[in-house]
Amino acid sequence: MSDDPNVYIYSGPLIQLCARALLLLLITFLLLVPVGICNIISTISIRILVVIGCTITYLLVLSVLTKSRTMELILAGATFVNSFFLRFPTRRDS
């Protein structure tokens, strides 16, 4: 905080609301990006690499931007990957 009496730093609920809204948009984007990419790609090995990369990015964002404990991050990663593969089963190339 500043010691200068001419500086006012707003710390009300509007800042928290905006921060949560931005975090929600970022997490939603990170969750939907691999879905779009994997719908375009048909090679299973590349799809797995996309999921691994997006999972790592997702967990990094969660760990940096939120006050997550290690167990919460493990559960978030497992849930992300599990729900992704259940929703989008691998396609077999003809």
Image (tube, rainbow, N blue to C red):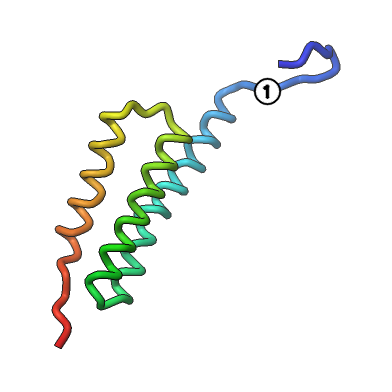
Task: Say which residue appears at 38% left-offset and 47% top-offset.
Answer: 58
Rate crowding at label 1 as few (under 14), some (14 to 19) or many (20 or more) other CA atoms within 10 Å: few
Up-down: is 61 above or below 51?
A: above
Task: Say which residue appears at 58% left-offset and 29% top-offset.
Answer: 14
Whether residue 12 sits left or right of residue 80 in the image: it is right
Whether residue 20 sits left or right of residue 5 in the image: it is left
Q: Quadrant of the C terminus?
A: bottom left
Task: Say which residue appears at 33% left-offset and 51% top-offset.
Answer: 55
Location of residue 1 by image quarter? top right
Location of residue 61 by image quarter? top left
Tell me the amino acid under the disc marked 1: Tyr
Task: Say which residue appears at 18% left-offset and 61% top-offset.
Answer: 87
Location of residue 15 by image quarter? top right
Whether residue 33 sits left or right of residue 6 in the image: it is left
User: Residue 92: x and y, percent?
Assistant: 14, 79
User: Residue 63: x and y, percent?
Assistant: 41, 35
| Residue at disc 1, secondary structure | loop
Up-down: is 79 above or below 49?
A: above
The residue lying furthest to the bottom in this view is 94
User: Residue 60: x and y, percent?
Assistant: 42, 42
User: Residue 29: x and y, percent?
Assistant: 42, 54
Q: How many marks?
A: 1
Q: Between residue 62 and residue 10, name the one nearer to us.
A: 62
Q: Between residue 89 and residue 50, name the one nearer to us.
A: 50
Q: Between residue 34 and residue 74, name the one nearer to us.
A: 74
Residue under circle 1?
10
